């Protein structure tokens, strides 16, 4: 047991960017905290403040004397001879060897295969010390965490409870505010309609002139006075409605949920009507004759199949993808029928399908030179690139989430018949991951996906599962992974 860690009026900002301000908290021994939020919101920086390798812009962190801290960074550069998963396991073992009172982990499930992921979750569940973790992994958030620090809109919002309760709480609050806004819209419309009726009555009364006076109805002067009073009353009502609407809109922005992407794909029915688009038979795959990683591989994919490939770290999953992409450094034997290169789209976590030296819209126009700027902008609008500064921003300046959206926009602009996805959800915040899922659910062609995230795989409606084990590719039953 250690004394509490105190955060007092903590703030963090960089040149031209504010992450959060005025955050205070007590971290008690045994707390299990997840720091969540968008890419670039300051999550990793907050971990570095807690381990005292980064000074906050404001406030202070009070750490008890002799507190043992274990830390595992997001990008591990040590042990370059190991795979990503092996590096993580080695660094985690080094951190746990310190018997830490406080364990700080930054996206620890990135690069882990399913077996290692489950092992990590079991370890975190058993860990007795204080755990603070940056993660976008829903399974980790559900099974290992009961306090959430959500960095959003320059604030850190604290929620205690389960991850699903946290999301449900946001959705319920949002629905309530949206209902109030809808009622306000109706009230404003009714107020406007009432004024229009009053003005219409006044005009009618004035046109009657002497006849109205003779019939002892309103004199015109009385009628006009009544309209003026109605306009003043309506003005006050409208002002009150507008003020309340602004307040509710501000509250709504605090409860931001992902916007919906509804992409349109360029693939037509006749382009995806062919059954077999890929067929591999009795193939050995490797880098040299004496370094064959996969043996006797057979795989057939039809036009609308969605295939998931599982396997431990360094089992040969990426090697198989490289062989399908026909990379020249891969040695292949056996029979191969592959789509033409222009019919294959490849997306990885590094967004290598983008040209970083040109703007967002130039990336799209490079793929579709037959489009004019207006058409390209309409397409980008579907992927949430709307403002001039967003559309003309240099691609190298984009955040990870923005690069993911642009990669998907590029794929949708000239849709391939086969889409290959290699660990594309690593490092993505939950909002961008939801966008990726929305696009892939709508994608009409065939998909091959390598991912360690079962939530992600199940959400994109996989039709066939394969596993690489001991150098062989075998079919998995639908309910296995």
Image (cartoon, helix red, strand yellow):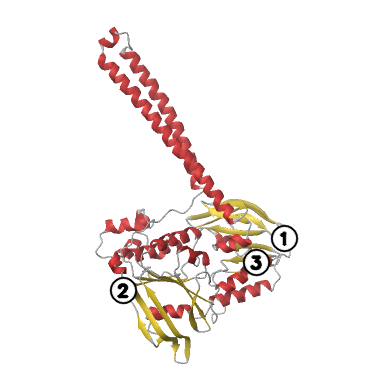
Task: Pick the residue in front: 254 or 140.
Answer: 140
Give the label, 2 or 1, closer to the camera: 2
User: Which numbered disc flags the more N-terminal residue, 2 or 3?
Assistant: 3
Residue at 28% over, 57% down = 375
Quote the CA–CA distance across marks 3 and 1. Answer: 23 Å
Rendered image: mark on residue 342: 2
Q: Position of residue 27 (x, y in %)?
A: 68, 56
Binning the other alpha carbons within 10 Å of mark 2 as few (below 14), some (14 to 19) or many (20 upward) gives few
Quadrant for residue 212, please give it.
Answer: top left
Q: Secondary structure at mark 3?
A: helix
Q: Do the numbered discs 2 and 1 sit on residues whose CB atoms are within 8 Å?
A: no
Q: Specify few, some or many for label 3: CA neighbours under 10 Å numbering under 14, 14-19, or 20 or more.
A: some
342 on left or right of 86: left
Disc number at residue 124?
3
Q: Are marks 2 and 3 in contact (CB under 8 Å)?
A: no
Return the disc, 3 or 1, that comes first in the chain's sequence. Answer: 1
Give residue 64's mark: 1
- 3 or 1: mark nearer the eye: 3
Residue 181: percent from left, percent from top = 46, 39
Using a 10 Å C-alpha cutoff, classify the residue at mark 1 as few (fewer than 14 neighbours), some (14 to 19) or many (20 or more). few
Can residue 399 be seen in this snapshot?
Answer: no
Between disc 2 and disc 1, whose residue precedes? 1
The residue that appears at 48% across and 40% down in the rendered structure is 179
């Amino acid at each position: 047991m250690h004394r509490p860690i105190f955060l007092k009026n903590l703030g963090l900002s960089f040149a031209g960017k504010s992450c959060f301000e005025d955050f205070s908290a007590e971290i008690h021994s045994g707390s299990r905290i997840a720091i969540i939020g968008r890419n670039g919101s300051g999550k990793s920086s907050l971990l570095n403040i807690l381990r005292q390798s980064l000074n906050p812009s404001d406030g202070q962190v009070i750490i008890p004397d002799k507190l043992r801290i274990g830390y595992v960074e997001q990008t591990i550069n040590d042990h370059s001879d190991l795979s990503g998963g092996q590096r993580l396991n080695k660094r985690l073992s080094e951190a746990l060897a310190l018997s830490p009172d406080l364990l700080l982990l930054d996206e620890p499930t990135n690069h882990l295969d399913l077996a290692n992921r489950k092992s990590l979750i079991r370890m975190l569940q058993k860990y007795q010390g204080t755990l603070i973790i940056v993660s976008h992994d829903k399974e980790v958030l559900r099974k290992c965490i009961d306090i959430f620090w959500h960095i959003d809109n320059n604030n850190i919002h604290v929620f205690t409870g389960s991850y699903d309760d946290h999301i449900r709480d946001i959705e319920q609050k949002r629905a309530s505010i949206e209902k109030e806004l809808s009622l306000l819209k109706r009230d404003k419309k009714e107020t406007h309609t009432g004024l229009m009726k009053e003005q219409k009555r006044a005009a009618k009364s004035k046109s009657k002139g002497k006849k109205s006076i003779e019939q002892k109805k309103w004199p015109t002067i009385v009628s006009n006075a009544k309209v003026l009073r109605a306009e003043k009353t309506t003005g006050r009502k409208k002002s009150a409605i507008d003020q309340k609407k602004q307040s509710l809109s501000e509250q709504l922005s605090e409860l931001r949920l992902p916007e919906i992407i509804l992409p349109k794909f360029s693939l037509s029915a006749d382009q995806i009507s062919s059954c077999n688009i890929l067929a591999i038979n009795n193939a050995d795959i490797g880098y040299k004759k004496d370094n064959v990683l996969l043996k006797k591989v057979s795989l057939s994919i039809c036009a609308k199949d969605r295939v998931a490939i599982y396997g431990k770290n360094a089992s040969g999953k990426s090697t198989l993808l490289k062989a399908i992409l026909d990379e020249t450094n891969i040695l292949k034997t056996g029979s191969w029928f592959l789509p033409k290169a222009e019919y294959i789209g490849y997306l990885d976590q590094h967004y290598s399908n983008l040209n970083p030296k040109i703007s967002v819209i130039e990336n799209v126009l490079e793929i579709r030179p037959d489009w004019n700027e207006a058409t390209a902008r309409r397409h980008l609008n579907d992927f949430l690139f709307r403002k001039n500064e967003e559309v003309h921003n240099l691609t190298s300046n984009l955040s990870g989430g923005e690069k993911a959206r642009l990669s998907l926009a590029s794929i949708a602009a000239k849709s391939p018949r086969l889409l290959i996805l290699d660990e594309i959800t690593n490092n993505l915040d939950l909002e961008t991951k939801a966008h990726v899922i929305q696009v892939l659910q709508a994608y009409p062609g065939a998909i091959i996906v390598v991912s360690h995230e079962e939530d992600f795989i199940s959400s994109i409606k996989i039709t066939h599962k394969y596993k690489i084990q001991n150098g062989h590719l075998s079919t998995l039953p639908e309910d296995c992974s």
